[in-house]
Image (tube, helix red, strand yellow):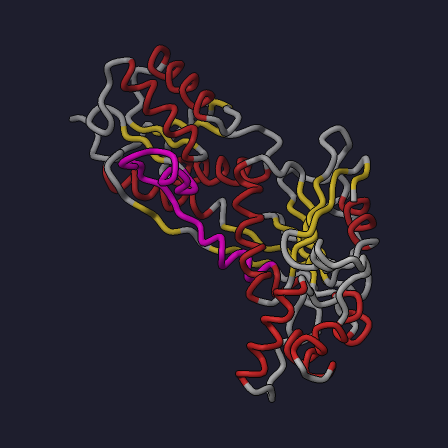
Amino acid sequence: MVSRFGFSCRIEGDFVARRPSNDTASRPVSMADVARAAGVSQQTVSRVANGLPNVNEQTRQRVQAAMRDLGFRPSYAGRSLRDGRYYSVGLCVNDVTKFGNLTMIDGIASAARERGCAITLVEMSKTEEFSLAEATRRMAALPVDGIIIGMSRLAPDFETFEPLPGIGTVIVTMYAHPRVATVDSDHYGCSLLLMNHLFELGHEQIRFIGGPSFSVDERFRRAGWKDALERKRIKPVKPLEGDWSANSGYEAGRYLVEHDRTMTAIYAANDQMANGAIAALRDSGLRVPEDVSVVGVDDSLDDFVAHNELTTVRFDLHQRGREVVEHAVPKTGMLDKAVAIRIPGQLIVRHTTAAPRA
């Protein structure tokens, strides 16, 4: 379904079965068709289709083979009428193509799959102002059992937002909400992990390359960097702003090389920018980590950079996905109000940090 708001798609399941092209009939394949082909009752087909017990294994395999041959898929519409559930979780994000959103979708989709649910995905229009109320209204019009909203930037109605009664709503954000469950990786705590690691090595002049100023994650990572320095009574130098890309990290790294002679370490707010900063340092004749240490956040380079050496923080995105899905569609049926879950990251020490030069 396409609208000016974005698009909606089912990531898994929920297809209407059609007869193979060599069958002259065009109507959907029914349970009666499968029952005739497998030589069993429709009740047995229903039990196999819904994964229920008390079906002989040989019979189950025969029914499943008939389903495959005929192109049959269970009717989720009928299933929802029977037990009052759609077996789908609604997920609304700002920009699907951004790396942070892709990893969020991956974690949530994996957790939903474990619960036997599909994901109904809606992308917010990049030209419209993001609103929790509007996102919820549009998502609630779809066949979903719970609503998940990825808030990569602060919504203008965050403080006043009222969730719809009777449907679980979770916001993926570091900000706590008085009436809605919020779940996220700890974007403040990850900075403390990295800063303490650099402090233990003896660094004090630690520069920060942040992401876009509108990013909620960036705000908390920057706040952790700033607070860690101030607790050591070290005055923070004005941070630089990137756009999460390696190119922006490269430009920031070049600027620091040309204008900052006292820095001994760089903390980039994601691994892409950290990788760009490392390239800029090395192109300028500086060694990493012998001359300048560099750290990042998210541990995202393994699939893109051969022999990844970056010291970083790794987030358990699957755990975050499980927490988000559990609070959007709780197994107990009881909706949690205003719970705030922050999942700590794990410091991954590799080869881009060392003690500063004497």
Q: How many marks?
A: 0
As rendered, which of 38 and 239 lies closer to the eye? 38
> Does residue 20 appear in the picture of this structure?
yes
Measuring from the top left, give residue 70's x and y in whole percent: 67, 64
Up the image or down, 58 lies above or below 227; here it is below
Up the image or down, 296 lies above or below 143; here it is above
In magenta segment, residue 301:
yes
Can you tell which quarter of the image residue 351 is in?
top left
Indicate the quadrant containing the N terminus: top left, top right, bottom left or bottom right: top right
> Does residue 178 appear in the picture of this structure?
no
The magenta stretch spans which residues?
297-324
Name the residue at 37% across, 28% down: 275
Measuring from the top left, give residue 265's x and y in whole percent: 31, 29
Name the residue at 48% across, 26% down: 245
Q: How would you classify the magenta stretch by its main secondary structure?
A: loop
Can you tell which quarter of the image residue 76 is in?
bottom right
Instruction: Give the residue furthest to the top.
Output: 258
Name the residue at 58% across, 29% down: 213
As rendered, which of 104 and 242 lies closer to the eye? 104
